[in-house]
Amino acid sequence: MIDTKQKILDTAERLFGEHGYAAVSLRQVIAEAEVNIAAVHYHFGSKEELLDAVLLRKIGPVTAQRMENLQRVLAEAGDQPPSVEKVLEAFLLPTAAVAQSNPTLVKLMGRMITEGMLPQIAEKHFRESGLRLVAALKSALPHLPHDELMWRVHFMLGAMAHTLTGVPIISLFAADTGDFSLRLRRLVKFLGAGFRAPAEGKEN
Amino acid sequence: MIDTKQKILDTAERLFGEHGYAAVSLRQVIAEAEVNIAAVHYHFGSKEELLDAVLLRKIGPVTAQRMENLQRVLAEAGDQPPSVEKVLEAFLLPTAAVAQSNPTLVKLMGRMITEGMLPQIAEKHFRESGLRLVAALKSALPHLPHDELMWRVHFMLGAMAHTLTGVPIISLFAADTGDFSLRLRRLVKFLGAGFRAPAEGKEN
DNA sequence: GTCTATACTGAGATAGAC
DNA sequence: GTCTATCTCAGTATAGAC
């Protein structure tokens, strides 16, 4: 059947999102998809490439939206620096749209970073929009030294990853798990203030 | 031999720190430690419990230092709110001391959260100092609503985890990898500003 | 081109002899 | 306390049916 590939993709997406990449075996995937184990390797080559295919199919639209939003924010600002919050929203809000229709996928995106999943794969899917994010942040914060900005982007991605998974790092610290877009707005506010903080010089 | 257990612990600590928990097999550990595979299960019970033992041995002092620092910051502030940055430093700087003597361990602490390693284990080792951190932050920011504070702690832990691992999420974003305490000071400044941002109300 | 059956290697875990 | 043997289950590879 031609939809063997689809069944594998759909099932893998769901299971990876629900339980994480490492925790899901190919045998679980093929059992639920009702296909043969070898079909996975025929269509995808390996478990890792299956993950890659799952992500490619789903993150593409998010990346496209991010690219478009960032470009729009820069265009609207004209020759003025755009606001940091606007830049952050442009990058983060596309995940909220996805979260409505497919909460599992957002978790998976978070887990990608969170599980230390194959840095090459993470890189592949975030590189394009990540580069544009950095460029936009540089416009918003022209006086922030490069090193400082890079570290702050690093902090941001860490915070973002854990926020997307929705899994409280320490269950005791769990706040409301509900409204996803409120969560993102909180994140934007928090990160915006952080990015705007004066730079920590190298010599104090 | 009585030091079979020690050899296993030492080797596991090094390998987990260098390559992560999931990526290291017990067979690698026992090969380098030159002990039998069954010794691991005899002394620790399982791979997971071995990780637990590794962490217990090493994180104990860090937690103690955190507890002491947080208490001191609160005491020094008297009946005034302490500064957010002082609270954050009290929590974060103990990792810098460890990083000097044992960089691998700090990576491992980061990876614990970052790899989504067994939430129960992460919780066990961070719960005590985490609770005191939250209490201290509440003193520093008495007007911040509880939910908002909890999410900000969540953001903070995500940023911290990725900063500790030292692994750039996207290699392109790698800044300097050197001075660990500078990195922490940058993190404190970034997070301090974020925590001090006005709350994002539930209804806007 | 697609898929199935089956086998291979290496993982964590366990029972039982010593 | 330690070690051998063995179990189950993982990801992977291949031969061959259709």
Image: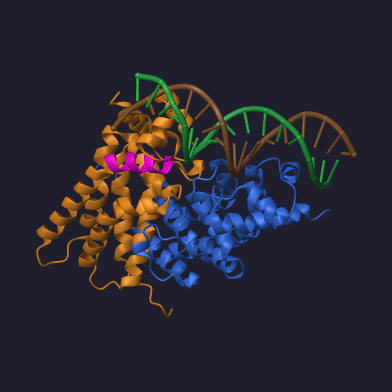
Chain colours: A orange, B blue, C brown, D green
> Residue A156 in the image: x percent, y percent?
35, 57
| Magenta stretch: helix, strand or loop mostly | helix
Residue B163 shown in magenta: no
Residue lying at 46% horizontally and 57% vertically, measured from the top left: B160
The residue closer to the viewer here, B56 or B136, is B56
Name which quarter of the figure residue B32 lies in.
Answer: bottom right
Q: Residue furthest bottom?
A: A203
Indicate whether B24 appears above or below B95.
Answer: above
Indicate whether B188 appears above or below A122.
Answer: below
Q: Which residues are magenta?
A: A46-58
> Residue B177 in the image: x percent, y percent?
44, 69
The residue closer to the viewer here, A187 or B177, is B177
Name which quarter of the figure residue B109 lies in.
Answer: bottom right
Viewer can see residue B192: yes
Q: What is the total number of numbered labels drawn onto the structure image?
A: 0
Residue A49 shown in magenta: yes
> Residue A148 in the image: x percent, y percent?
35, 70
The residue closer to the viewer here, B179 or B136, is B179
Name which quarter of the figure residue A19 lies in.
Answer: top left
Viewer can see residue B71: no
Residue lying at 69% horizontally and 51% vertically, measured from the top left: B30
Task: Say whether residue A77 is left or right of residue B204.
Answer: left
